């Protein structure tokens, strides 16, 4: 059961581990669905954030274009062309799978119509 993500949101805010804004993940379907597609928007609020390796990861994902997402064991998995790229854990962390490194955390954006 997806307790953390049982929302009608189509957007997650991406932050550094320190809570600095990095951007968004935009989903074509509600996160209450089992899967769908997504894209990344990298829009840091502070210019010094642009130099972080975490932001480089997000830029590389953004440049690839549309990704797929699915639910797996209570976590949201984002993949590109069949290769898993990110895990959004139900504890709020984001892990970059190829480097096995935590790149930040996520926050939900609630649907205004919900």
Image (cartoon, rainbow, N blue to C red):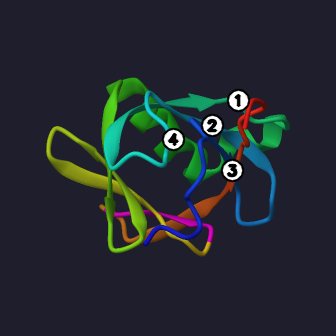
Per the image, the residue denoted by label 4 is 58
Determine the CA span between mark 1 and mark 4.
Answer: 10 Å
Q: 73 left or right of 5?
A: left
Badges 1 and 4: C-beta atoms under 8 Å apart?
no
Residue pushed farthest front?
Answer: 114
The x, y position of residue 83, in whole percent, is 18, 50
> From which residue to which does the magenta span run?
92-97
Badges 1 and 2: C-beta atoms under 8 Å apart?
yes
State yes or no: residue 96 in magenta: yes
Residue 24: image tag = 2
Determine the CA span between mark 1 and mark 2.
Answer: 8 Å
Q: Label 1: how many residues lie within 10 Å, few (<14), some (14-19) or many (20+)?
A: some
Q: Label 2: how many residues lie within 10 Å, few (<14), some (14-19) or many (20+)?
A: many
Label 4 SS: helix
Q: Earlier in the sequence, mark 2 or mark 4?
A: 2
Label 1 SS: loop
Residue 84, image quadrant: bottom left
């Amino acid at each position: 059961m997806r307790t953390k993500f049982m929302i009608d949101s189509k957007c997650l805010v991406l932050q550094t581990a320190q809570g600095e804004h990095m951007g968004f993940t935009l989903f074509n379907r509600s996160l209450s669905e089992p899967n769908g597609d997504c894209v990344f928007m990298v829009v840091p609020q502070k210019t010094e954030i642009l130099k972080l390796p975490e932001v480089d990861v997000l830029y590389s994902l953004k440049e690839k274009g549309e990704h797929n997402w699915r639910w797996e064991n209570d976590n949201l998995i984002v993949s590109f062309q069949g290769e898993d790229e990110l895990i959004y854990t139900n504890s709020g962390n984001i892990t970059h799978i190829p480097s096995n490194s935590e790149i930040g955390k996520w926050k939900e954006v609630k649907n205004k119509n919900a």
